[in-house]
Amino acid sequence: MAHEGIPFQGFASEPVYSLRTLRGIKSLMKLAKAVSAARQSLDADRPDLIFSTGGYGAAPAGFAAGKLGIPVVLHEQNTVPSRANLLMAKHASCVCTVFRGAEKHFPGSRVVRTGMPIRRELREAALKAPETGDSIFVFGGSQGAKVISEAAITASLSGNDLKCIVALGKSGADNALGADPTRVETHPYLSASGMADAFSRSFAVASRAGGSLAEIAAFRRPSLLVPLPIAFADHQTHNAREFVEMGAATLIPQPELSPETLRDALLEWKSDEERTAKARAALAEWDILDTVPQILSILEGAVS
């Protein structure tokens, strides 16, 4: 952040998984030390507000702010909140959420569903995107999702008319498996403009089920979701179920994923125009266009 002219100070911490182990006790001691350091720093600088997106890295500043009476606003990106956000919510002015199912985890707190901030390039492209395309778009975050990429590439080479655009991730260059470039378009990484183009040319998306669901909703694309099995509290499965319940996605647990299950699920979306239209309508209702102005208004209100 220094190259942007924004001062940065970190407070070393790590997850506290269990106090029944030596590692857990050491992690708690490290967190306590980090909270003390954060409190000294915040007491000296006296910021007007702490805005936290959760995670153990945010915990020291969030806990210290609570002790100093500095307003805290949280943003929770998943259906199942992080442990840090659950604890910080007790003294937060407001908890901003993305998924409808998150609110029940914050009883007694002020909760506003603001949605997820989306890069301006993607939001502007989504507003102009065609209703559908002729390919599937496959991605799994900056590191890719090897199991999804390989299943999609194999499915596209199995003699059907399924074409795919695959973002392999920075370390996934070997996943192309000698794919036919006329049927499989692979990229190690896609910029915002590349993501927008891939969404616009797709009729459906295959991905994990994290924060990218907000981008999928912005482009009104039905999806096949393969939650990351090791995600904290299986939150990606809960995220995916919210989309499934509103008729906008198909969920395939990773152990059940194969080229055949992926192909069949996606071709079902391609062949059922009525189902796809209902998915688009549900995603339009779920999507929130004014996320950033809402969050800014909440931040301003917290310090007024």
Image (cartoon, rainbow, N blue to C red):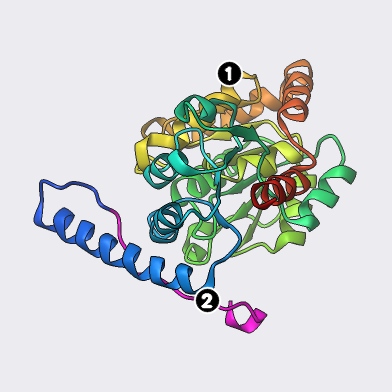
Spot occupied by residue 75 in the image (x, y as percentages of width and height): 57, 46
* Quadrant in the rendering for residue 33: bottom left
Residue 69 lies in the magenta stretch: no
Prevalent SS, magenta region: loop
Q: Residue furthest right?
A: 128
Report the residue marked by disc 1: 245
In the image: residue 142, left or right of residue 39: right
Residue 13 counted in the magenta span: yes
- Image location of residue 157, percent across then percent down: 58, 44
Q: Which residue is mark 2?
A: 8
Between 118 and 34, the residue placed more toward the observer is 34
Q: Amino acid at mark 2?
A: Phe
Decide if residue 203 is in sight here.
no
What segment is highlighted magenta in the picture? 1-15
Is residue 29 rendered to the left or right of residue 239?
Answer: left
Element type where label 1 sits in the image: helix
Q: On screen, 5 above or below 27?
A: below
| Quarter residue 25 falls in | bottom left
Q: Quadrant of residue 112?
A: top right
Residue 202 seen by the camera: yes
Residue drawn at the location 68% of the way across and 40% of the way down: 216
**Residue at x 45%, y 31% (from the top left corner):** 237
Residue 46, x across and y down, in percent: 54, 67
In this rendering, the answer to whether 194 lies above or below 136 is below
- Give the side of residue 204 with respect to residue 258, left or right: right
Q: Which quadrant holds the N terminus?
A: bottom right
Which callout, 2 or 1, points at the residue further toward the start of the chain?
A: 2
Between 210 and 288, the one nearer to me in the picture: 288
How crowded pointer 1 is (Cα within 10 Å; few <14, some 14-19, many 20+) is rated as few
Amino acid type, residue under disc 1 in the picture: Glu
Q: Position of residue 48 (x, y in %)?
A: 61, 61
